[in-house]
Amino acid sequence: MNVQKHDRAMRPKETEGGDLAWRAPSEPPLRLAGFAWFAQDGLYRRMPARPQWPLPEAVDNLADCTAGGQVQFRTDSRKLAVRVQLAAPASSDHMPQTGVAGFDCYVGPPGQQRYVSTTRFPWGADSYTCPMFELAERAMRNVTLNFPLYQGVKEAHIGLEPDATVEAPPPYEDGRPIVVYGTSITQGGCAARPGMAYTNILSRHLNRPFINLGFSGSGKGEPEVARTIATIPEVAAFVLDYEGNAGGGLLEQTIGDFIDILRERHPEAPILVVSKIRMAREFTSPGGAADREAKRDFQRDLVEERRTAGDENLHFLDGAQLLAEDFEECTVDGVHPTDLGFWQMARALEPVLRGILGA
């Protein structure tokens, strides 16, 4: 059945955009965030194009996904659209292409942003031009656009009325980024739209830049990945949330060294270690809960041991606290959160990060 035939609200929403003037996300006074190496490489990419240490193939490939990328500005334009050339079409069987390959839009001052719209485009498209809003009143507004979570972006442009005023966005509470390293859940699987990845929710609530270094199925704590991440300058805090990809003893083998590598370059930056969230397989897999609890205890004990030894900027959070009691109901597949699950994760992480950052 073709539902679009009967329901106009279910149809893609594209536009020619011929009456708009187009700007690149990096064009001042627009502020591009979430890409630590953009100034060096000029790419919407989450790891350097020419890393000092060879990256695992999966990490190198997934770094082209633009999870956590944002562009922010102020404008009085009554119209706003985005024109996008993707690296490839969306290709997920359990995550909407609006989250995989779409942009979404928020309007409002820091800490008060409200969701407005998401790009809607035909299934399988590798490029699109979509309206984000068309308003009757001309007034200055703060705009945040979130990049796709699970696809690369070759080119992106923002369309505004030609005579619109465009200004820099309000400053961050603290311009130093919070760097989050982890798994598919960190990357944003399976949010329905980019703004619902937990790092993007936290960025809105805290008014701080986040760098999302979630690598789907591939957050395994390799030392060359840690060394590359450690080169990001002036980091406000690190969050390590990669247990879910580091089974078979890999977590125990890597996390101590990972912390050491970060500490070499960032001796005072807070580091928050987060254990794995609960998953539905604990109901069907004998020993699943016991294994998660053992890894939780290992990470907690490691952090406590190092804090006792003097590293008071190292912290631990039990990931089982991030989702509600009926945690499996907050997932798409028993593993990856829905938007509700990500909202709960962000709400639980927010006070912890505020405490660590002294905010």
Image (cartoon, helix red, strand yellow):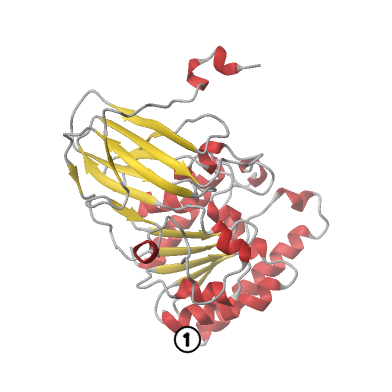
Horizontal side of residue 222 vs 164, given as left or right = right
Dot 1 falls on a residue whose secondary structure is loop
Type of residue at label 1?
A: Gly
| Residue located farthest toward the bottom when viewing the structure as drawn | 309
Q: Residue at the location (44% across, 64% down)?
A: 179
Judge whether residue 146 can be spotted in this image: no
What percent of the width, then of the height, locates residue 55? 57, 70
Q: Residue at the location (49% across, 30% down)?
A: 121
Q: Tell me the quarter of the image containing the C terminus.
A: bottom left
Image position of 5 with respect to 179: above or below = above
* In-front residue for pair 279/167: 167
What percent of the width, then of the height, locates residue 2? 62, 17
Q: Residue at the location (20% across, 26% down)?
A: 137
Crowdedness of circle 1 by 10 Å Cα count: few (<14), some, many (20+)? few
Horizontal side of residue 79 vs 129, given as left or right = left
Image position of 86 with respect to 31: above or below = above
Horizontal side of residue 286 vs 78, given as left or right = right
Image position of 180 with respect to 15: above or below = below
Judge whether residue 205 can be spotted in this image: yes
Q: Tell me the quarter of the image containing the N terminus.
A: top right
Q: How many labels does the image show?
A: 1
Q: Quadrant of residue 240?
A: bottom right
Q: Name the residue under label 1.
A: 310
| Residue located farthest toward the top when viewing the structure as drawn | 6
What percent of the width, then of the height, locates residue 261? 51, 81
* In-front residue for pair 112/154: 154
* In-front residue for pair 34/359: 34
What percent of the width, then of the height, locates residue 150? 54, 48
